[in-house]
Amino acid sequence: MTTARDERLFVVPAGQRIVAAGERNERLYLLAEGKVALIPAGFLEPWRRLGPGSAFGESALTSDALSPYDAVAETEVQLLPLDRAALVTLFKRHPESGLALLGRLAEAIVQALVVQIDRSSAPAGAAMPRPVTEEHHIVRDTPAPAPSAWRIELPDGSTLPLPETASDLLIGRPDPASGITPQIDLGAHDPYRSLSRRHARLLRHGAGWLLREEPGVVNGTFVNDRRLAPGEAAEVHDGDRLRFGAVEIVLRHVSGGTKR
């Protein structure tokens, strides 16, 4: 890790592991710029991708806890590392910022626990990520193909175009308290609050998309009435009905791809 462009931040190049699964971590990290993937021990795919304003390395808050994941820089990142002394200072001088940070960490810890539960209690035959081998520690985005004109049809009959350059879209409902703002906000179409804040993700896959449920979702994610298994990434096509709890949308390709 090299010294940063200012006296507080550190710059980490793309592809470098910042926190190692199964090892003690002495610092909590605040992500100022860039993108970090968190990969649980024994998994190939990340269960969470972090952007600016996020925090990771929460195992540093205890004296003997081991990190449950690898944290890998997917792009060049700028980090603010905080040891225990720095955290104490933060809470004394800026208690509101400290409480906001605790909220983010609590969410991360709950999701990490859910991942471990999913691994131990998934039903027989459920699609689980392949084990991580050493050469798979570095996670890189698949280069996006030429943009396609995709949209979703919402329950009220309106349509929402998907950003042409996006490769990872969070689906859910916003939560001002934790700062969660999904790119596909379905909260207004969910009067029964069956939708999770972080419910699922649409991931660019070649010329189309994969749909994957986020950890901790209770009310399920469905493709044409088939519920996705934990860890499963299902390919979705033009005309597919996607349901998140009680909220159903339809995926459309504007140029008229093959319907399923």
Image (cartoon, grey):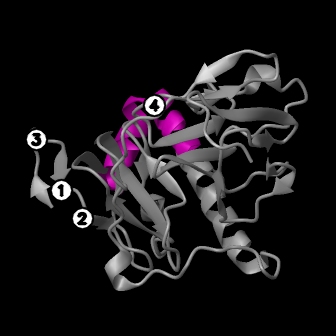
In the rendering, at what x and y percent does residue 156 appear?
Answer: 81, 16
Query: Separation of disc 4 and disc 2 at Cα?
Result: 28 Å
Question: Is residue 35 visible from the viewing direction of this image?
Answer: yes
Q: Earlier in the sequence, mark 3 or mark 1?
A: 3
Q: Secondary structure at mark 2?
A: loop
Q: Give the residue type that dot 1 points to.
A: Pro
The residue carrying mark 2 is: 16
Query: Separation of disc 4 and disc 3 at Cα?
Result: 21 Å
Query: Separation of disc 2 and disc 1 at Cα?
Result: 6 Å
Q: Quadrant of residue 197?
A: top right
The residue carrying mark 1 is: 13
Q: Which mark is residue 97?
A: 4
Vertical placement of residue 130 versus 248, above or below: below
Q: Residues within 10 Å of mark 3 (few under 14, many from 20)?
A: few
- Answer whether labels 4 and 2 touch (C-beta < 8 Å): no
Q: Earlier in the sequence, mark 4 or mark 2?
A: 2
Q: Earlier in the sequence, mark 4 or mark 3?
A: 3
Q: Magenta part mainly helix, strand or loop? A: helix
Q: Give the residue type that dot 4 points to.
A: Ser
Query: Separation of disc 4 and disc 1 at Cα?
Result: 28 Å
Vertical placement of residue 249 versus 127, above or below: above
Q: Earlier in the sequence, mark 4 or mark 1?
A: 1
What's the magenta region? Answer: 82-104
Asked if residue 251 is among those painted magenta in the image, a careful observer would answer: no
Nearer the observer, disc 4 or disc 2? 2
Q: Which mark is residue 7?
A: 3
Question: Is residue 57 visible from the viewing direction of this image?
Answer: no
Residue placed most toward the observer, 13 or 136 = 136
Q: Secondary structure at mark 3?
A: loop
Q: Give the residue type that dot 3 points to.
A: Glu
Taking 106 as reference, is 27 left or right?
A: left
